Image: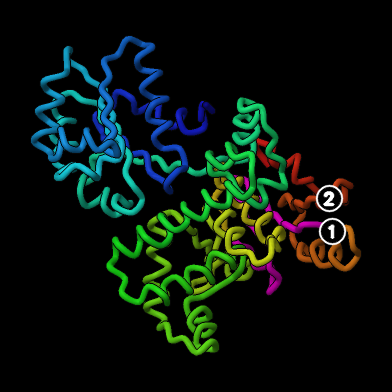
């Protein structure tokens, strides 16, 4: 088991707080494991803890609603202060009422919920601001390395570029078995969950648009450009429908829209944005004939790692030239360009020239999978393998 200190360190200050602690994120990213890691820490401090997993049928049968949950907790608690862990709490009818009540009964409440049924806007609506939420993501590469070592397996950077970081992905020795797992996961969280949640009637059109978006990660889009593309394929998807479907994917933590930042106006540009997948496996399982999109997956992975490292990220437009990331943290700005390789002269000139006319007070970085150091007097070149081990730029 990987101790996910990156998340625990953020949650730890709220252990005794009366706010409801929500662990959220895409399915199979490790939310339940983090709940158990928190509980383990508290039990080592001799705190009274109680855990319910509502994915288990017998637990749902025993505790179907808010009244049953409140009664069960009150009957089992022994002391004054109780640390209560509710996994997949959305399966309890009236879960929100139960959580609000129990926090007033000296319970420190921790919950997780399925991304198909318990989304960020539900937190605001159902818990009325009496919560703090923490988003959990699939493994970054440093976590993958640690888990692979525990399993006595090897999960190379190229595996990460293709198959991403869902924790269970590291457990498969056979690629065919891994593909089955990821395809089943995709069917559940990308198609079934959203189609059922939003009662989508035109499922074939929804799935075609989703496939197009997920296989086109790390590219600039607008709702109009997506609608126009399908119009060229003789499929009518209106701009409002595109916007609606994209919001579904965002709310389920499947994609993120990253705005463009203009160097001229020094503001974020509306309407256009880049799309990044929560995990690059969403792209790879859609690849034909094993022709995996390593170039765009590499950029997507750099984005995921920057977000994990705590950077505020936008796309930077330098007088019409795109630089992949403007990363901001602790008052410092970094410009980051990503390419699979700059070994060829054409690629070298294209990627390095994007930094033209930019003040040298801003640190400029290019990240590639090359082994040779291509740093210049003004631009730092980071090898991907080194960047993945960094905590800061």
Q: Secondary structure at mark 2?
A: loop
Residue 67 figure quarter: top left
Q: Is residue 309 visible?
A: no
Query: Looking at the image, is 37 positioned above or below residue 344?
Result: above
Residue 72, given in percent of the width and then of the height, sits at: 13, 26
Q: Which residue is mark 1?
A: 342
| Residue drawn at point x = 81 percent, y = 49 percent | 381
For the image, the number of numbered tags is 2
Query: Looking at the image, is 208 positioned above or below residue 340?
Result: below
Q: Mark number for residue 19?
A: none
In the image shown, does 116 or 111 lie closer to the viewer? 116
Q: How is the image coloured?
A: rainbow
Residue 50 figure quarter: top left
Cα distance between the residues tagged 1 and 2? 7 Å
Query: Looking at the image, is 239 positioned above or below residue 68?
Result: below
Stretch in magenta: 315-341
Q: Is residue 112 left or right of residue 353?
A: left
Outermost residue, right side: 345
| Residue drawn at point x = 22 percent, y = 34 percent | 58
Q: Is residue 35 visible?
A: yes
Q: Which residue is mark 2?
A: 370
Image quarter where the C terminus lies is top right
User: Reading the chain from its start, which is encountered first: label 1 or label 2?
Assistant: 1
Labels 1 & 2 near each other (Cβ < 8 A) = yes
- Residue 316 magenta-drawn? yes
Residue 204 figure quarter: bottom left
Q: Secondary structure at mark 1?
A: loop
Q: Is residue 384 left or right of residue 208?
A: right
- Residue 199 magenta-drawn? no
């Amino acid at each position: 088991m990987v101790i996910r200190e990156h998340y625990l360190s953020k949650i730890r200050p709220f252990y005794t707080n009366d706010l409801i602690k929500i662990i959220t994120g895409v399915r199979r990213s490790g939310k339940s494991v983090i709940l158990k890691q928190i509980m383990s820490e508290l039990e080592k401090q001799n705190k009274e803890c109680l855990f319910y997993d509502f994915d288990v049928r017998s637990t749902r049968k025993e505790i179907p609603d808010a009244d049953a949950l409140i009664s069960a907790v009150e009957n089992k608690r022994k002391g004054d202060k109780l640390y209560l862990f509710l996994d997949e709490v959305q399966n309890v009818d009236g879960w929100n009422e139960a959580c609000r009540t129990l926090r007033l009964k000296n319970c420190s409440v921790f919950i997780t919920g399925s991304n198909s049924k318990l989304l960020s806007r539900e937190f605001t609506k159902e818990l009325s601001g009496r919560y703090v939420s923490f988003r959990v993501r699939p493994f970054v590469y440093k976590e993958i390395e640690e888990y692979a070592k525990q399993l006595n397996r090897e999960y190379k950077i190229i595996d990460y570029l293709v198959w991403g970081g869902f924790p269970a992905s590291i457990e498969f020795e056979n690629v065919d078995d891994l593909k089955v797992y990821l395809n089943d996961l995709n069917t559940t969280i990308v198609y079934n969950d959203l189609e059922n949640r939003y009662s989508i009637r035109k499922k074939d059109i929804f799935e075609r648009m989703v496939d197009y978006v997920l296989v086109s990660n790390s590219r600039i889009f607008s709702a109009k450009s997506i609608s126009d593309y399908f119009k060229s394929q003789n499929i009518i998807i209106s701009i409002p429908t595109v916007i609606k479907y994209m919001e579904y994917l965002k709310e389920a933590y499947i994609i993120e829209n990253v705005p463009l930042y203009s160097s001229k106006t020094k503001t974020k540009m509306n309407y256009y944005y880049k799309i990044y997948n929560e995990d690059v496996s969403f792209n790879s399982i859609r690849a034909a004939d094993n022709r995996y999109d390593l170039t765009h997956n590499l950029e997507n992975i750099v984005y995921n790692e920057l977000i994990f490292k705590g950077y505020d990220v936008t796309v930077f437009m330098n007088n019409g030239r795109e630089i992949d990331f403007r990363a901001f943290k602790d008052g410092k700005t970094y410009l980051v360009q990503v390419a699979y390789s700059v070994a060829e002269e054409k690629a070298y000139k294209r990627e390095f020239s994007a930094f033209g006319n930019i003040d040298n007070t801003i640190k400029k970085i290019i990240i590639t999978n090359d082994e040779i150091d291509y740093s210049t007097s003004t631009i730092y070149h980071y090898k991907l393998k080194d960047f993945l081990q960094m905590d800061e730029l």
